[in-house]
Amino acid sequence: MVTSALVLTLTPHPVERLRALARLAADPRLELGEPVKDRLPVVAEAASAADGAALCDALGAHEGVLRVDVVAIDFGEDA
Amino acid sequence: MDRRDFIKATAMATAAAAAARLALHDDAGAQPRVADGVTWDKAPCRFCGTGCHVQVGVKGGKVVAIAGDQKADVNKGLLCVKGYHVGLALYGKDRLTRPLLRRNGKLEPITWEQALDVVADRVMANPAGFAIYGSGQWTIPEGYAAQKLIKAGIGNNQIDPNARLCMASAVTGFLSTYGVDEPAGCYDDLDHCDVVLMWGNNPAEMHPVLFSRIIDRRSRGEKVVLVDLTTRRTRTSGFCDRTILFEPQGDLAIANGIAHLLLERGTWDRGFVEAFCNFRKPTSPPTLDGQAMTFDEYRREMAAYTPARVQELAGVAPADLAYLADLFGNRALRITSLWCMGMNQHTRGTAINDLVHGIHLLSGHFGKPGDAPTSLTGQPSACGTVREVGTLAHALPGGRVVAKEDHRQEAEAIWNLPPGRISAKPGYHTVEMWRRFSTPKEQGGDIDTIWVQVTNPARSLPNINELFLPSRKLPGKFLIVSDVYPTATAMAADLVLPSAMWVEKNGMFGNSERRTQQWFRMVPPPGEARDDCWQTIAVARRLHDRGHPGLKDKDGRFLFHVVDARGAAVPVWDWRRYYDVNVDEQLFEEYRKFTRKKHKDLAPYQEYVKTRGMRWPVVEQPDGSWRETKFRFARFDDPYATKADIQFYHSVTKDDRALVWFHPWEAAPETPDKDYPLWLCTGRVLEHWHTGTMTMRIPQLQRAMPQAYCEMNRADARALGVHDGEVVVIESRRGKLELPVWLGGRGEPPRGSVFVPFFDETLAINLATLDAHDPLSKQPDYKKCAVRVRRRGAA
């Protein structure tokens, strides 16, 4: 299991932001932290590093997510 | 709490701390928590020249985790996709683990003792024909050891790095303008500027962490104007307020056109120019000093670069040129220019570097935070190892050159050599070195052995059909390669030496903003892989033991005399003893003696152990602390600028003034014609670094961008009847290869041009590129040559 610590930058648009938060909260691979202004701490879990990278890419394409910054990664069994 | 919960909780704490820091600018510097037996230590990233720091998590002798280093000024805890995966670069399945010697056409395992003998045999047989080809990925001590072996030991000056191919024109630009190399500004400029002007570079993909730093300011509501001057639309263009497309080679005309408008409108900065500038024009043959000209002569030369003429030469509309001149003419703005390969890989690379510095000087956009012309580098220690240690065929450490007697004498004194030991004759620059290696001896091919360390010239040299491949068929030519993976170069070698990589060894890098960084070995290298620095010292010792006279100093001591804490000599050429002492520290402390002459002062090694790097000059303070310098030549920050607000204290003209150059526009050496109607531009992509020898072995990156492609304009594709994904033949006068076409990809080349990335070892675009190079920097142009594209099977 690969575990990534991410920071998502959310749109300042309030409605889009709420929708984005709802969609992210519904994703079982993600654990959301408490937003700090427009920054949302997220922990993402994936079966492999490849899946983790794909998940990051997918998050970046979410409506309402402006950017995904990677803060840390634990490679788990993939290392 | 089980292990998984613990890791998740730790990750959330790390993410939350980073989110708070980003949102609130709280630089508390939280670090990864120690979790589950993982130990953490700092290291700069292995990849590009940005110099991000990572925290490396190690468990059981393996790198198991990577985190952005929140104490690092450069990246403030963030990483790009390559940095995110840097730990996995160590663990490709095909690491080289034993020395290999080619016998009867096949590489066979041998011992290290045998391998060192083979290298020593080659040197002793013909010392004059032996060369080292190194890298901006060498650590500082590695490059210093190779430099000392060649310049002080073997004595033929035949050493040059791959950085010749990536930033040599930036060096000549700084030298010819300020009399000393490397940028005056630093990344802090990105936090203070109002305008970022990108001259032919694509930082959104190539320096993403720096680009994020700018975009982050926008997300906080700050106004930062981004302008993209480019020959093709890239990911960077999508973020820019204005993208100005220009014809290849048109940058020279644009720069002159901006100067023309500043002069014509009277918006140049008279006070700055009169106080701090002289004027220069080129000579024939060209030199870094050029010929003096008056301001009025400069103005007359620039008068020819009217907006109409710039439009004709560069394809840039007068309104766009006026927009650029408006920016530079507004002194209330702070303007940072950034550039990388677009300006450097250019047959007029020195000229365009000079001209961009000249616009900043002419308009007074210099010497204040945010007002700076700043080159970026592509390799992690192109600055630290190549430019500062001077691992170039003409250079000595600390900004010295072999051609100057006083410089040689200073080096001989520091190295304790007999007078006259260092040769005054420069070795061959990269293109010439490889050309001679690929030329029969009887036809002037006087380089017969090259030892390659930390680079892949079989794919990164231009025009490899002429510069690399012939050597592999010529009798008497012998190629030695030290590397971590079986690269294209390693697989073509006669002798392969397995190397340690990144945190498998101690190291130091120097990044694009004059920042020197240090790290310690954290995990063992696989099998019999060993440090490049050890390899150099071990070969030196072999030569010493065989009686090569250059390997002793004037007191008869071995050139690499290393001692322990009690002062007793340690035989570090014996691998079992190499880590008995910190060889890096001893080499660095010796090298540090070279750095004061050009005011590139470095702090003691142990100071770098404590920090995430410091930017030189680093000067000791009365209280014993060491202070870095962010903004050179500016009295408010640079301790060596004492006479005026701005002092160019290495001025070519010895009067503390910089040089503003005039250079005319000149056509590229090869331009599209009826036979080869398209421009070819080559470069990198986000996922891969250089020739892909590391990143193509990281499955995530390989899957994200699995192979090279030919990016085309849709109209050109339609005209050729080519569909997206179709394999085409791309062909120049020098070579050809087959590639799939990508339409509507990341980049958008304008009609009449194609782009091909060079990361794919199996699809070598440098079969087609041109080896024409800048007359001063000797850097080739990978961005402009003429090609044709046809459907596979079509005549």
Image: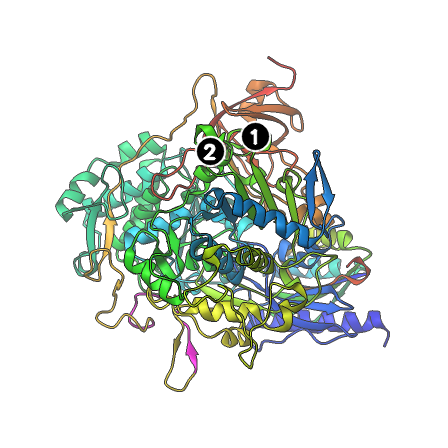
From the viewer's perspective, tell me whether residue B544 is left or right of residue B688.
left
Identity of the residue drawn at 63% across and 58% down:
B83
Question: Magenta span: helix, strand or loop, mainly?
Answer: loop
In this rendering, does residue B511 appear at all?
no
Report crowding for label 1: few under 14, some 14 to 19, many 20 or more residues within 10 A (C-alpha): some
Specify the label residue B445 is tagged with.
2
Circle 1 residue: B474
Which is nearer the eye, B45 or B521?
B521
Instruction: Say which amino acid is labelled 2.
Output: Gly
Q: Secondary structure at mark 1?
A: loop
Q: Residue furthest top?
A: B795
Residue B758 or residue B216, whichever sits in front = B758
The quadrant of the rendering that contains the N terminus of chain B is: bottom right
Nearest the viewer among A79 and B767 is B767
The span picked out in magenta is B625-637
Q: Is residue B371 visible?
A: yes
